[in-house]
Image (tube, grey):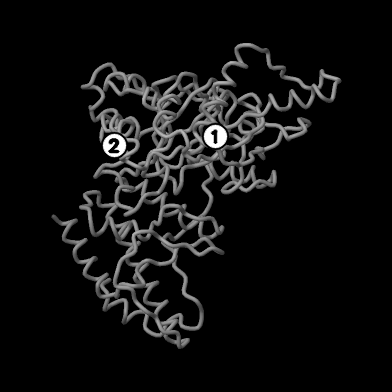
Amino acid sequence: MDASTILETYKDKGLNEVPKCSLVNNCSLPYPCSELLTKEQLSPLIHRYYINSKEQAVHSKLKEICMMYPIVVIHGLTTALEIDLDVFSTESLLKTNPNMPIDVLKQIKYSSDENWDTQQKKKVWECFSHKSSSTIKNYAQYQAQTFLDDNDETVHDNISTFSSPGQVTKDKEKRTVKFATNVDLSVVEMWRPQLYELTKLPPFLKVECCDNMLTYVGYDILGMNTIQVYMKVPGCKTTGHQENNNFCSVNINTGPGDCEWFAVSYEYWGTIHLLCAQAGVNYLSDSWWPPDLDVLHKNNVPVYRFLQKPGDIVWVNVGCVHWVCAIGLCNNVAWNVGPFTARQYELAIERYEWNKQHKFKSIVPMMQLSWRLACMTKISNQQLFHLIKNCLKQTMIYNYLILEFLKGKGVEVQHNNQLRKQAHYCKDCKVRFSFSTYHTIYIMDCFIYLFNIYYIT
């Protein structure tokens, strides 16, 4: 369907109401089969891949394994490629930019496999998390003091054994932890040593690569197509979530302590969404943590559980639900990637539509990304090609109907000839403004033509 066909087909249609655009035919929660899983199936073993040489590190089998399973732990890769993880230590970050502002979450410290209300009376899904601002210097001091306290004192687990109100207050403070969530390493000039070490990784794991869809967004999405470090003390929790728009992620534990991971395959996120809703928690926007694993097992949801040691890389595949607890003092470095697969693109578009329906902001501008992929890349995967082309067609139709609707209402449309790099979102419904309203539909038709040539060649 070219531009002239669109003009002819949709002429005088939909002019009495605001046009809508849906990039997928069906946007609903996934539900796995109802067959009851065995005890062993509910606690599946994590898939591990061991690297002992540089040759193994760059072998295609590593990528094949990562694309095959919901989540994979890669052992020995940082050692084999001689990646210096010390550049991500608190000491190194402190030397580089001590006064850099960071976000800090204050959380209540519980064991990794349970979650309680703030009064410690019942297990709940909602996870207490209070956001504030700090600096690398201040958090480094907090990390150091926590390390000393953990080695010099025994922290009591049950505050109900104390009768003194003053003692109870003091112990409550010990039961809270602070989690530095977004040390941004996007400024290349400042963080060159850190970013250089990550260029040693195999291409599919790199933050910037021609085979990574997020490379083509056109601007920085902090923590997604840029690097971020997370600074932790024992008990810090990365609450339950899927990655933005279901993109894959790479996470390296730089040590010195361990992290404990919990993960659930994409097919079960609908069940967790319902459990959150029943508990009065918003799956997309609230901080949540399963009250205990039995809740998930009783609902037939299998959960991967494993430790990430210093130097281990965790690959989180498309749409995998996960939550992470720091067992020791550690820093983690992480980012997202978008492999050129039909599944990655399809689930990214599905989540884009789901977010739109629920007025939740999609950080990745999928329409803009789709047009940039059509203009700037050659798509060899036929299924992916048709998914992207369908997105282009739907956005062309949508923009034509929008322009006709506005014309019918007597609204003058002004076109900006300069392309904006960054996407703009409505502050109320969180939907991204259509970037292509300042293109003509005929220019888009040229893009479609070019896209066909790229695919054929």
Nearer-the-camera pick, 329 or 25: 329
Name the kind of residue labelled 2 in the image. Phe
The residue drawn where x is 42% and y is 20% is 310
The residue drawn where x is 76% and y is 32% is 122
Name the kind of residue labelled 1 in the image. Thr
Looking at the image, residue 40 lies above or below residue 413: above
Horizontal and vertical percent position of residue 388:
31, 57
State the residue lying farthest toward the right.
163
Disc assigned to residue 238 = 1
Residues under numbered marks 2 and 1 in contact, where contact means CB atoms less than 8 Å apart: no
Left or right for 371, reference 72: left
Nearer-the-camera pick, 247 or 131: 131
State the residue lying farthest toward the top.
152
Looking at the image, residue 6 lies above or below residue 287: below
> What SS does tag 2 mark?
helix
The residue drawn where x is 40% and y is 49% is 221
Separation of marks 2 and 1 at Cα, in angstroms: 24 Å
Left or right for 127, reference 375: right
Disc assigned to residue 359 = none
Horizontal and vertical percent position of residue 64:
30, 32
Instruction: Answer with the quarter of the image where residue 456 lies.
Output: bottom left
Disc assigned to residue 204 = 2
